[in-house]
Image (tube, rainbow, N blue to C red):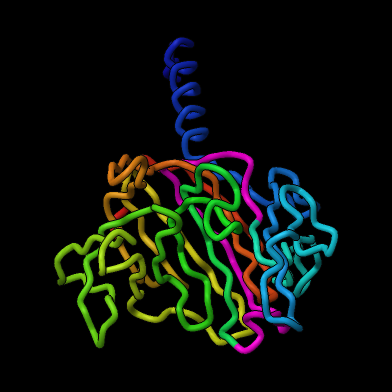
Amino acid sequence: MKFIPVHMVLSAVVLCLLVSCSNSSHDLFNGRDLSGWETWLGPNFDAVTRKWDSLNGSGLNNDPDKVFTVVQEDGESAIRISGEHFGGISTLDEFSNYHLTLEFKWGKTKYAPKDSASRDSGLLYHAVGPHGAADRFWMRSQEFQVQEGDCGDYWGVEGAEFDIPASLEQGEFVYDTEASLVEFTERTAVGRHAIKFPDGEKPTGEWNVLELYCVGGDAVHVVNGQVVMKLFNSRQVTTGDVTEPLTKGKIQIQSEGAEVFYRNLTVVPINTMPSL
């Protein structure tokens, strides 16, 4: 039998532990309660007058109508977002350089002012600054759109910007791997919205798997295993037209007029962007 020196064994064990820790997954949802999250609800919408009540809003960690709850859905624990009031549920922790995976499914209920619109939510990442900065509902962030028929679209929220390869088609910019980078910003006529391609969403009522890769200033949106957009040079507008990198922040999920369920939310640290 060949003996291996103790110091070599210990070194190997330490190295394995370091590698394991650096790539270990982190569950954002424990399946029991909303520990690790905070909620924000902005002004209420009056369905009778069809107006926003600018003097009314629940604010931080005040959810009297139970917009955000933990339920059993299809035999598993899930976060239910009723959509009754606009706002979001956000991680307490900030994240950078990670692979986020989650599952979502649309519910049945819709609320004014989007009771006649497509069901809507949204995965906001690199969320920074105060709650309610965007329309009194959401934080400054990059948005991985979660909306019926539009899952994977990009929106820049409250001064967040990205460069995306896109082509102009019938007045809309659509993700195109062969196109030049376009600067998506609310400061120009281009605007802050890019349409995903292809469409990877499953029919309403089925569970979808969303994946988000973020490394440095770059990101990739994946819907049910299909890459639907690659984004570059994440940044935010500060004073005036000055920009600075936006590569770290909270993860926020929107409540925006539609019932939706989220489950199996995990984050794995990564150091390099995988080949996708």
Question: Which of the two residues, 141 or 32, is positioned nearer the viewer here?
Answer: 141
Marks counted in the figure total 0
User: x, y percentage for residue 77?
Assistant: 76, 62
Query: In the image, 167: left or right of 91?
Result: left
User: x, y percentage for residue 133?
Assistant: 54, 51
Question: Which of the two residues, 14 or 224, is positioned nearer the viewer here?
Answer: 224
- Up/down of 44 relative to 197, above or below: above
In the rendered image, the quadrant that contains the C terminus is bottom left
Q: Which residues are magenta?
A: 89-116
Q: Residue at x 47, y 27 (%)?
A: 18
Using the rendered image of the protein, determine whether residue 194 is visible from the camera's viewpoint: yes
Q: Residue at x 34, y 79 (%)?
A: 198
In the rendered image, which quarter is residue 238 located in? top left
Query: In the image, 27: left or right of 122?
Result: right
- Up/down of 240 relative to 259, above or below: above
- Up/down of 17 relative to 70, above or below: above
Query: In the image, 182: left or right of 229?
Result: left
In the rendered image, which quarter is residue 138 located in? bottom right
In the rendered image, the quadrant that contains the N terminus is top left
User: x, y percentage for residue 185?
Assistant: 31, 60
Residue at the extreme right of the image, as rendered: 64
In the rendered structure, does residue 91 fall within the stretch colored magenta?
A: yes
In the rendered structure, does residue 58 fall within the stretch colored magenta?
A: no
Query: In the image, 20: left or right of 68?
Result: left
- Up/down of 218 relative to 44, above or below: above
Using the rendered image of the protein, determine whether residue 81 is visible from the camera's viewpoint: no
User: x, y percentage for residue 175?
Assistant: 27, 73
Q: Residue at x 44, y 41 (%)?
A: 248
Question: Which of the two residues, 266 or 57, is positioned nearer the viewer here?
Answer: 57
Question: Which of the two residues, 103 or 136, is positioned nearer the viewer here?
Answer: 136
